[in-house]
Amino acid sequence: MGQGAAVISRRTALAGLGLPLLGCDRPAAITGALQGASAERGHLLRERGSWPAPASAGRVRVLIAGGGVAGLAAARALRRRGIEDFALLELEDAAGGNSRSGEVAGIACPLGAHYLPLPGDDAPEVQDLLQELGLRRREAGRWIYDERHLCHAPQERLFFDGSWQEGLLPVQGVAPATLSQYQRFAARIEQASRAARFTIPAPRTPSASHRALDAITFAAWLDGEGLGDKHLRWYLDYCCRDDYGAGIGTVSAWAGIHYFASRHGFQAPGAQNVEREGVLTWPEGNGWLTRRMAAGLGERLRLGRVVTRIAQGRHTVEVDAWNAATQGLERWQADHCIVALPLFVAARVVQDAPALLRERAKQTRYAPWAVANLHLREPLKDRPGAPPSWDNVIYGAQGLGYVDARHQSLDPRPGPTVLSWYCAPGEAARKQLLSRTWRDWQAEVISELSAPHPDLAAKLARIEVARYGHAMAIPVPGVLAQVALGAPRAGRLAFAHSDWAGYSIFEEAFTAGHRAGLGVV
């Protein structure tokens, strides 16, 4: 969330809410663990001075470096073309990148991204994937999505001024001046959409109006428009932190407007004939998608490999990778290599890296991220107002709210569940994010969620925290101009990652990987 007066300090929450509410009964012990991207493996690239002599690992037609959404999409595109002679090297012990999933006490939950908006016609590659997976079908000339996978109602609620309200925009008890600013902002989003279309994936040749928005921060644009209402700006800051990992003072005005104009617009309270945008989601989040994308790869998928060097020769590409299981260096030979790695990693491992790659890597800023999965023995008590929803957000909090793993369940009986709590602490907190223990995170989560759920500490059985030091590229001012330069194609190397789009969403990563797979000769 953004910064606000409703933030509750950890000390206040723990002393004033947590312990007294537990009564005299001694709570059961809480267990925990740290998960997420392996910082230890990733840091080998900068901390290890030398590598042992490599052993031959094999030769393939295509080598894919990186098993996130882009790498998996590239593998799918190759297979659809009949190219089966490839290998995919992934640093982690499971493919999927920011869209991986896990389990806590046998309950599936996300380790990162947890939903996918229904893609529009500007993302035909993603639409085709969803059709292949049985998520959408053609009926009587219309595309129909499987309702079992659409987000169940109620979708969103906000804890604001001591009670829950429907939706995430503060509306209950706000002043008429606030409502007026909501309406003005909605009008400006509509005007911006008419000036030049906002699409996903974003066009690689931005219009003049988009370039102008890309030159300033979202906060500066709001200042220029006279949109200073604290509730509106909190909500917009939350939206940017939720999608980009950084707030309105950091992301570009293009990114801030794109959040709304590329999908559902902005509906001020009282707007008529507004059809709510559909969202696909699962208890395990987007891990539902990536697990299916990886399912048929078999031995082509090589996990626990840290790519340390990619060198292009006249007739082949040589790729070295550290095998975490054997603690040995492997050397692969390939005709082509699809580099589906974050820019800062690709620039480090590609020998004689193209100038455009080196420059983009220097200029790209990354947001750290944390996802805490909380196993609860039984459902939480609730404050008055709107009923429990899929997305539950607390006004003014440091975190970004939580989703409930049981929300998509068709079983009406209450029972144990997992809440997935999200936090984008900001670039300055990257080192702290990786150094904190799970007990530190436990204290923060209890502090924040005890306001709407004072019985959380008593019902919490286990916490598992996934941490990502470089979770996503931040679309700061100037990024759109860099994106317009495109990703380089350097001989036998092709580059595919959401970083090249300047911001991190499933549609951008999948489209980049798909096109890279199609481009292999």
Image: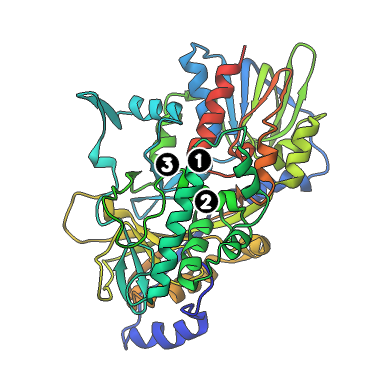
Residue 439 coordinates in the image, percent (x, y): 52, 70
Q: Are marks 2 and 1 in contact (CB under 8 Å)?
A: yes
Tell me the SS state at disc 1: loop
Residue 257 numbered mark, or none? 2
Residue depth check, mark 1 versus mark 3: number of the one nearer the observer: 1
**Residue drawn at point x = 36 percent, y = 67 percent:** 158
| Label 1 sits on residue | 198
Which of the 4 image quadrants contains residue 432? bottom right
Mark 1 to mark 3 CA distance (whole Å): 27 Å
Between discs 2 and 1, the one toward the N terminus: 1
Neighbour tally class for label 2: few under 14, some 14-19, many 20 plus, Cα within 10 Å: many
Q: Is residue 157 left or right of residue 225?
A: left
How busy is the neighbourhood of tag 1: few (under 14 within 10 Å), some, or many (20 plus)? many
Residue 471, compared with residue 62, is above or below; it is below
Image vertical order of residue 181 relative to residue 21, above or below: above
| Res. 236 visible in picture | yes
Helix, strand or loop under label 3: helix
Q: Residue at x 67, y 31 (%)?
A: 486
Under mark 3, the amino acid is Gly
Under mark 2, the amino acid is: Ile
**Which of these two is toward me, 139 or 75?**
139
User: In the displayed structure, would residue 408 be above or below residue 69?
Assistant: below
Residue furthest left in the image: 412
In terms of image quadrants, where is residue 499?
A: top right
Disc 3 marks which residue? 287
| Neighbours of disc 3 within 10 Å: few (<14), some (14-19), many (20+) | many
- Residue 84, image x, y percentages: 52, 14
